[in-house]
Image (cartoon, helix red, strand yellow):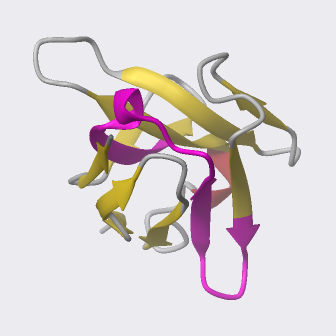
């Protein structure tokens, strides 16, 4: 069974930093590891659509939403099977539930349960 488990959320002051981690397991046993096209971080505020914040593609390239470009960065740790989201110079508008996902060739996606990030002004 594939599992994505987010951690690291919490309360942070505006201007501060926070690191979220997504631990991924089971992709080998599920036979999908070679078909993963990207590992991603999204966020969602109640009443609004889920937003793609950052992605790391299978070729190692990364992409970011304009709203976080220059402030957020993703890092993969293959020894821990994690994708970390480093959040710097956070703003109150970064407050959201942050989700990790895997996109698989063919259109499937797998999601974690999310972790709350709250930025105080």
Identify the residue at image location x=37%, y=27%. Answer: 93
* Residue 42 picture location, percent across and down: 43, 34
Is residue 88 shown in magenta?
yes
Residue furthest out toward the bottom: 79
Can you say which quadrant of the picture contains the C terminus? top left
Image height check: is 19 above or below 49?
below
Q: Residue 109 sits in which quadrant?
A: top left
* Residue 78 picture location, percent across and down: 73, 77
Left/right of residue 76 with respect to residue 96 in the rendered view: right
Identify the residue at image location x=25%, y=52%. Answer: 114
Q: Nearer the viewer, residue 10 or 4?
A: 10
Residue furthest out toward the left: 47
Q: Residue 48 sits in which quadrant?
A: top left
* Residue 83 picture location, percent across and down: 60, 63
Left/right of residue 64 with respect to residue 43 in the rendered view: right
Is residue 83 shown in magenta?
yes
Image height check: is 55 above or below 114?
above
Identify the residue at image location x=61%, y=46%. Answer: 89
Q: How many numbered circles does the render carry?
A: 0
Residue furthest out toward the top: 48
Image height check: is 40 above or below 86?
above
Left/right of residue 19 with respect to residue 66 in the rendered view: left
* Residue 15 picture location, percent across and down: 54, 48
Can you say which quadrant of the picture contains the N terminus? bottom left
Image height check: is 113 above or below 105?
below
Which residues are the magenta region? 76-102
């Amino acid at each position: 069974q594939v599992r994505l488990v987010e951690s690291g959320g919490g309360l942070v002051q505006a201007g501060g930093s926070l690191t979220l981690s997504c631990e991924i397991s089971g992709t080998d046993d599920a036979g999908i590891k070679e078909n993963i096209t990207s590992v991603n971080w999204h966020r969602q505020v109640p009443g609004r659509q889920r937003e793609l914040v950052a992605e790391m593609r299978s070729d190692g390239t990364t992409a970011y939403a304009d709203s976080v470009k220059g402030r957020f960065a993703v890092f993969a740790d293959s020894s821990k099977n994690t994708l970390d989201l480093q959040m710097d110079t956070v703003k109150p508008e970064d407050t959201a539930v942050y989700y990790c996902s895997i996109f698989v060739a063919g259109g499937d996606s797998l999601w974690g349960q999310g972790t709350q990030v709250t930025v105080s002004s």
